[in-house]
Amino acid sequence: MNEITINSRHDRIQIADALRGFALLSIVLLHNVEHYDFYFFPEGLPHWQKVLDSKLWDSVFFLFSGKSYAIFALLFGFSFFIQFNNQEKRGVDFRGRFVWRLFLLSVLGMFNSMFYSGDILAFYGIIGLSLIPVCKWGDRAVLITVIIFMLQPWEWAELLYTLYHPGYQPPGNISSFYFGQADQYLQGSSFWELAKGNVWNGRLADITWSWENGRLFQTSAIFMLGMLLGRRGLFVSVESKLRFWRRALLLSAILFILLYLLKASLPAMIIKESLSGNVSLIISSCSNFALASLLVSSFVLLYQINPIQRVLCHLAPFGRMSLTNYLVQSIVGSFIYYGYGLGLYKYTGASFSILIGSTVIVIQIIFSHWWLKNYGQGPMERLWHKLTWINLSPSRVFQKAV
């Protein structure tokens, strides 16, 4: 079951790093298009630009919203397996150290939240705890748990309750209240007001939104699935696993098409309006995961084609420094768009925002290549690694995680 050992910082699984880089790339583009959760559509733009912005907005959200983070979550679970497996081979129980590692990630997330309230690091720091009770389960038990969580058990429970209690009305979205409060400090000129608002109001907005959109169960499920991919060695010696990835590509494509058509016909199928929210969320959750799986499978298969691999492998350093690059893009992005900085939210539609995001990505890719040639590990990755293994004897230090 445990097929992988990664012991050296030079012994990396490059395809996983490149895929992580692709996920981060799409996250940066999405964040720029939505002005880092500060939705504002400039007036006075020419008609052709408004049409272009609308098309780009729809395309970026269709391709990446809910999918990029799913890929990121998959690789988070995969990295956990690498760490857990390597320590288990040394006779060390990694679970206690992993809890400490998640706490450190949450601290970094709260720092990042000062700039961007949509931070996922603190969220991962909490949801990552779901890996601890299942990490020693058999594959079948984990897979059953993944399926149950992916199907959104809370939504099913509320759906059944609504069916048996016709007068019940599901509560409205709490997150919209908190997001409504954010405009005041996002467009304001004070960074400290922004930081205070993001850390309190912004975190509440993000937590309630994640619950209302099924991200808690879905993220836990994807973490576990990433762990299963690690157990099966599906990112290692991919040439011998191509049959699996081709099947995954076909199945995810079929599943996505069916779910997309089902969601499109949902209004005509649902008679009781109070049921539509639960059903739509269940379908959307599965549909987003199906498209994310399609993207992952396509990436893995394309990576086997040498000319394409030579292009995609440039994303590997970007992915290896994903923690550093994620934090930096939040800081830079908030300064570009929010009121305390350049305030470009007032002037940039989707097209210009994509250009800005692409520029940030190119700079970060170039910087990542240079940094890793000279230092071998990203600055925040190194800090997280050192603090993870603080007070551990040198002979037992885990040298490098994926």
Image: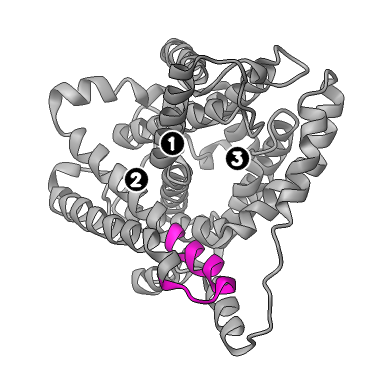
Q: In this rendering, does residue 173 appear at all?
A: yes
Label 1 secondary element: helix
Residue 256, compared with residue 11, is above or below; it is: below
Could you tell me how far apart the alpha carbons at marks 2 and 3 are, in whole angstroms?
20 Å
The residues colored magenta run 269-285
Q: Nearer the viewer, residue 27 or 92?
A: 27
Q: Which mark is residue 5?
A: 2
Viewer-nearest residue: 355 or 1: 355
Please name the residue shown 42% across and 49% down the image: 74
Mark 3 against mark 1, which lies toward the viewer? 1
Q: Earlier in the sequence, mark 2 or mark 3?
A: 2
Amino acid carrying label 1: it is Asp
Q: Earlier in the sequence, mark 2 or mark 1?
A: 2
Q: Nearer the viewer, mark 2 or mark 3?
A: 2
- Looking at the image, do the residues carrying marks 2 and 3 touch, with CB atoms under 8 Å apart? no
The quadrant of the rendering that contains the N terminus is bottom left
**Residue 361: image location, x then y, percent:** 46, 18
**What's the residue type where badge 3 is placed?**
Ser
